[in-house]
Image: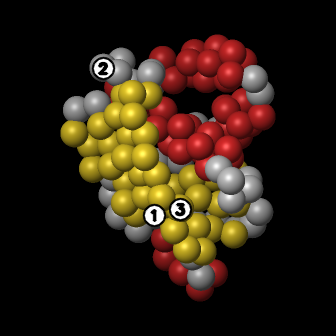
Amino acid sequence: MKIIGTLLLALAISAPASAMDNSAAEQLEQLDPQTRLEQRCDLEAMERIHKDPLKMVPDELVAYAFAEPKVNGDKIRSTGAAFRSKGEWYHLSYTCSTSPDHMTILSFQYVIGQMVPRNEWEHHFLVP
């Protein structure tokens, strides 16, 4: 599932935490619980990647690019995700656990993988 939108993404990675919390929370609360879990964890992934020492600038994430995420209650595991940074796509795996309302991240682990070759982009729903 794609990130909610450019505005929400911009708030998530460029604004102070309180601004992201207010705007993003309002948008997330309007979603059904399953979508909220996915979107909240996608946002967390983007925020963590943005703060990562690798100096990535994520602007898009596709959690299902190489494999469907596995959801179990308040936990999602995405081993086939991808994110775009500076015009290139990278493999991503993450595991995310949230509170029952899917608004608070309880645990989050991620691994940034290798760059995805351009000839694979279209097949995996990755846009330039």
Give the SS element for disc 1: loop
Marks 1 and 2 sit apart, C-alpha to C-alpha, by: 26 Å
In space, the residues marked 3 and 1 are separated at their CA atoms by 14 Å
Viewer-side label of 3, 2:
3
Precedes in sequence: disc 3 or disc 1: 1
Badge 3, how many Cα within 10 Å: few under 14, some, many 20+? some
Q: Identify which amino acid the numbered label 2 is placed on.
A: Pro
Classify 10 Å Cα crowding around label 1: few (below 14), some (14-19), many (20 and above): many
How far, Cα to Cα, is label 3 from label 2? 27 Å
Q: Is 107 located above or below residue 65 in the figure? A: above
Front label number (1 vs 2):
2
| Residue 103 makes an appearance in the image | yes
Q: Nearer the viewer, mark 3 or mark 1?
A: 3
In the rendered view, would you say 6 is above or below 69? Answer: above
How are the residues colored?
Answer: secondary structure
Measured as percent of width and height from the top left, residue 35 is found at 40, 34
Instruction: Tell me which numbered mark, 3 or 2, is placed earlier along the sequence.
Output: 2
Mark sitting on residue 45: none
Q: Are marks 1 and 2 in contact (CB under 8 Å)?
A: no
Tags 3 and 1 touching, CB below 8 Å: no
What residue is at 65 percent from the left and 50 percent from the top?
52
Label 1 sits on what residue type? Ala
Which residue is the site of mark 1?
Answer: 65
Q: Residue at x 38, y 40 (%)?
A: 96
Instruction: Locate residue 28, reporting x and y percent.
Output: 51, 23
Where is mark 2, residue-wise? 100
Label 3, on which residue?
112
Is residue 7 visible to the viewer in this orientation of the structure?
Answer: no
Where residue 92 appears, as percent x and y from the top left, is 49, 60
Q: Residues within 10 Å of mark 2 (few under 14, many from 20)?
A: few
